[in-house]
Image (tube, rainbow, N blue to C red):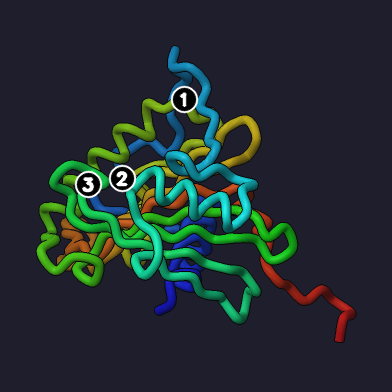
């Protein structure tokens, strides 16, 4: 699946989870709280990923990628999502997390704005054949802990929600509505009282407006 389509599918799955359409929850996960209590952590301000900031155009993001990862030229893939009319820059980066394996990082640019609206980071066997189940779990645990303490608004935080094809580890928004979503995908084995997730991919998304993304849509009455 092309990167833009994959991350859009992940975003749709995560949004469904947040509004309450959940798969049966295992005995372990049922004890997890959906909304966190307020903490003393400073408020999060999600501006993008590293040097790449929301609102940047392609040229600026390419410069940010070069500054952050030393990648340019053939190491950077630029493509389009022909359905959503968005542009996508994709790179492969080893050890964004220490010993976490090579991740695919995708920068998505809005249909109308032509600026950065979303960044997706994907770990899977497709991005690095040495990544194991243990790697995905470890990366997920590390990122969930980081996001949970990052200062996202407590009334927007959801975590540890079991879905049909994985677990929404975290979702939270800052005061501007910029949103972080962390999803561990895979398949479950066992019965409803003792489910075991066999992970296949871990995705971290940073989005400007996940509820109304800047993509091509057809409005009622247009046709």
Q: Residue at x 57, y 56 (%)?
A: 59
Q: Quadrant of residue 167?
A: bottom left
Can residue 20 be seen in this snapshot? no
Q: Nearer the viewer, residue 77 or 87?
A: 77
- Kindly identify which numbered label has been placed on residue 151: 1
Q: Who's the residue at 29% across and 33% down the image?
A: 145
> Which residue in the structure is indicated by mark 2?
30
Q: Are marks 2 and 3 in contact (CB under 8 Å)?
A: no
Q: Residue at x 10, y 64 (%)?
A: 130
Please provide percent x and percent y for residue 45. 54, 29
Report the residue marked by disc 3: 139
Q: Identify which residue, 162 or 42, lies in the foreground.
A: 42
In three-dimensional space, the C-alpha distance between marks 2 and 1, rounded to whole angstroms, equals: 24 Å
Residue 50 shown left or right of residue 83 in the figure: left
- Residue 98 horizontal/vertical position (percent): 17, 42
Q: Secondary structure at mark 1?
A: loop
Left or right: where 189 falls relative to 19: left
Residue 34 x/y as whole percent: 42, 39
Report if residue 35 is visible in the image.
Answer: yes
- Tell me where residue 184 appears, x and y as whole percent: 30, 56
């Amino acid at each position: 699946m092309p990167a833009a389509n994959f991350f859009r599918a992940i975003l749709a799955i995560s949004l469904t989870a947040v509004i309450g359409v959940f798969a049966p929850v295992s005995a372990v996960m049922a004890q997890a709280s959906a909304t966190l209590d307020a903490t003393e952590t400073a408020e999060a301000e999600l501006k993008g990923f590293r040097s790449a900031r929301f609102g940047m155009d392609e040229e600026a993001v390419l410069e940010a990628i070069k500054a952050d990862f030393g990648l340019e030229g053939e190491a950077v893939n630029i493509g389009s999502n022909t359905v959503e009319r968005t542009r996508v820059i994709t790179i492969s980066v080893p050890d964004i997390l220490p010993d976490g394996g090579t991740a695919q990082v995708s920068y998505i640019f809005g249909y109308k704005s032509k600026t950065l609206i979303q960044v997706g980071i994907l770990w899977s066997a497709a991005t690095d054949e040495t990544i194991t189940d243990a790697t995905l779990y470890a990366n997920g645990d590390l990122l969930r802990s980081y996001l949970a303490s990052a200062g996202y608004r407590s009334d927007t935080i959801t975590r540890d929600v079991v879905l049909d094809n994985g677990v929404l580890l975290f979702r939270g928004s800052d005061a501007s509505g910029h949103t972080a979503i962390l999803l561990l995908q895979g398949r479950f084995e066992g019965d409803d009282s003792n489910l075991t997730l066999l992970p296949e991919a871990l995705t971290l998304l940073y989005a400007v407006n996940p509820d109304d993304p800047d993509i091509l849509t057809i409005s009622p009455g247009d046709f």
